Amino acid sequence: MTESIINLVEEYDKIIIFRHLEGDGDALGSQWGLYYFLKDKYPHKEIYAVGDETKGYAGVYPEPHDLSEGQYKGALAIIVDTANQERISGKFYVHTDKIIKIDHHLPVDNYGVINLVDEKRSSCAEIVTELLKAWSNDQALVYEAAYNLYSGIASDTQGFSISSVNSKTFMMAAYLMESEINPSEISQKLRQVDLQVFKFQAYATSKITYVSDSFAYLEISQADLSEYNLDVQEVKFLVNVMRPIKGLKVWGLFIEVEPELYSGSLRSHGININAIASLYGGGGHLQASGVKNLTPVSKADIINDLLAVSK
């Protein structure tokens, strides 16, 4: 498949890289890692990275390119870390000529002419790294590409601590370190939050609802966000504050994005919560999934379902 991707990329003079809405570290790291690789590899081509604003990662990743609708025509689209078309950030992808999909979520929508998907991988950035390693004949990547890809792996694996991390994950990280990146510096950037977000984290932690020894959830209201002058993207990471709690098997974060409309982030240790997420129109990974457009009633229902599987 590597050869097929290379051949298709070399056919086009304009390549636009997309990722999912409300990009996280993996989506952004994969996108910008691929961007810098292609810019270095093909300096004569037009290469762009597009998407919505990502406040939670301001200063960590570059700002997306702002393109007119007409600039998408005749381009090759590469879409990373995005399971289905509804989640693609940038509606003008429909004007591109062909699509390459690179992803590690459970297969939902094979919308590309080439679909490089492996749901067993720890991150999309790991897949992109392996692709670029083969593309470069094992030669070290340009620094900016390696920096961003390592950030994607480190971010989505929670510092190499999730169950999908394996020897290949560390092999890809080791390969990226040949570009003389500084893992400590990258980890520090990913973990840093401004003082207002830190204060909100302390407040939010006090609001965690412990339904049982094995299940807990955190609910954040619009009033909470307004009081601290924060938006949804800046607090989505709070799903991870419950992860270290001893005995917890399942946990969730529910953020009120509009009056009485919630976005949910679900996590677990070894339990398939994707099956529950899919019942409510969501999905992702077996142990990390998201759900949107939850009403107070459906939010209560999904909480009961998560409690049931946690026992």
Image (cartoon, grey):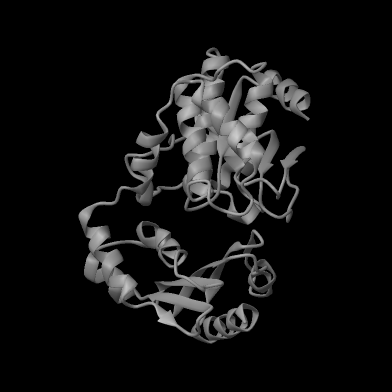
x%, y% of residue 34?
Answer: 56, 29
Which residue is more in the foreground, 12 or 32? 32
The reply to whether residue 61 is in sight is no
Which residue is more in the foreground, 51 or 168? 168
Q: Residue at x 61, y 32 (%)?
A: 171
Q: Residue at x 66, y 37 (%)?
A: 168
Residue 221 figure quarter: bottom left
> Is 135 drawn above or below residue 224 in the view shown?
above
Is residue 57 found left or right of 223 in the rendered image?
right
Is residue 292 found left or right of 308 in the rendered image?
left
The quadrant of the image that shows the N terminus is top right
> Is 248 drawn above or below residue 94 in the view shown?
below
Tally the marks: 0
Which residue is more in the foreground, 69 or 214? 214
Is residue 259 found left or right of 153 in the rendered image?
left
x%, y% of residue 77?
Answer: 63, 35
x%, y% of residue 203?
Answer: 27, 71
> Is 33 drawn above or below residue 281 in the view shown?
above
The quadrant of the image that shows the C terminus is bottom right
The reply to whether residue 124 is in sight is yes
> Is 90 drawn above or below residue 307 in the view shown?
above
Q: Residue at x 33, y 61 (%)?
A: 231
Which residue is more in the foreground, 68 or 255? 255
Most distant residue in the top direction = 44
